[in-house]
Image (cartoon, grey):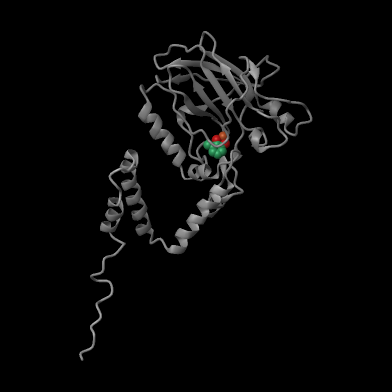
Amino acid sequence: APPVKLKANCASRKSQNDASFTERVIAATGPNADRRLVEVMPSLVRHLHAFAREVNLTVAEWMAAVEFINECGRMSDDRRNETQLLCDIVGLESLVDEITSRMLATSNSETPSAILGPFYRQDAPLLPNGSSIVQNLIPSVPWYEQAVASSAFVTGRVLSSSGVPIKGAIVDVWHSAPNGLYEQQDESQPDMNFRGRFETDADGRYAFYALRPVPYPIPDDGPAGRLLSLLDRHPYRPGHIHFIVSAAGFRALTTQLYDEGDEYIAKDSVFAVKDELVVRFAPRDGDPDARWSLEYDFVLGRA
Ligand code: MBD
Ligand code: FE
């Protein structure tokens, strides 16, 4: 009998590595699928497949990535969101923040948003205008001198996009200590240290005492930090003060202000700096409670 002729291995066989395979995966979607998922999943699947093809992703590399994401999840709790941090260092939180605020903006005079970040806490104390978010500043705290030298009075108004002051707006503010740690990362700090909420007066004005923020490294002892070092990147963010400004009838604004002279202003490890959010602290005379002052108005868009 004549020898069996073996078919050439690849030539005619259907391959997973082509566009029709990708479309077959997308076409598996059923008629009762969630509407938004029907919109987004085809794009996600196409980009994922294109990525894997473009870099010739191997099974070992893909499995390492799966384990990496699992590790982020295992590490996360209500004090630390490692998966969010991973998104931050690849610019994804900043990108979706920008997409969202552009989509919802009703004018172009609104204050730009910036990302929330992983250290916001709800229910910061509601404090009277003109009071301080700095708790327990006594000479025995290790960064006492630094805190005194960076003490700052922060004030401004909350305005509608046509410039009308908004009374009763809530300015929710938080920043890290001079040691670069937010209160919940640091056992030595009192609960809710460097956090407060202030209500604007009849002129739309808020006012509080705080510290000029210092640059600090994002938590880099987990998988996100490992990725940074594999990429030969530093973990620092420029010093910043976080804000959520809200008022009835207006869209809440999540944003951050940055100190002009900060050495990391142009190299934020989470890519959140915007020009309009960079501010200059001015020397303040005759106030025993503050060496610096900052004036900044927030402009909210209609809900
Ligand atoms: C932060 O303090 C922060 O504000 C962001 C956005 C990410 C990591 C740490
Ligand atoms: Fe922060």
As rendered, which of 100 and 238 lies closer to the eye?
100
Q: Is residue 191 above or below residue 301?
A: below
Direction front: furthest residue:
32
**Visible in this render: residue 71?**
yes
Residue 153: where, in percent of width, then height? 62, 19
Residue 260: where, in percent of width, then height? 54, 30
As rendered, which of 45 and 214 lies closer to the eye?
45
Residue at the spot x=58%, y=21% of the render?
A: 197
Residue at the spot x=20%, y=90% of the render?
A: 2
Residue at the spot x=30%, y=51% of the render?
A: 26
Residue 104: where, in percent of width, then height? 37, 27
Quarter of the render that holds ligand 2: top right
Can you say which quadrant of the picture contains the C terminus? top left
Q: Is residue 261 above or below residue 222?
A: above
Residue at the spot x=37%, y=54% of the render?
A: 51
**Visible in this render: residue 263?**
no
Q: Place residue 144 in its image quadrant.
A: top right
Direction bottom: furthest residue:
1
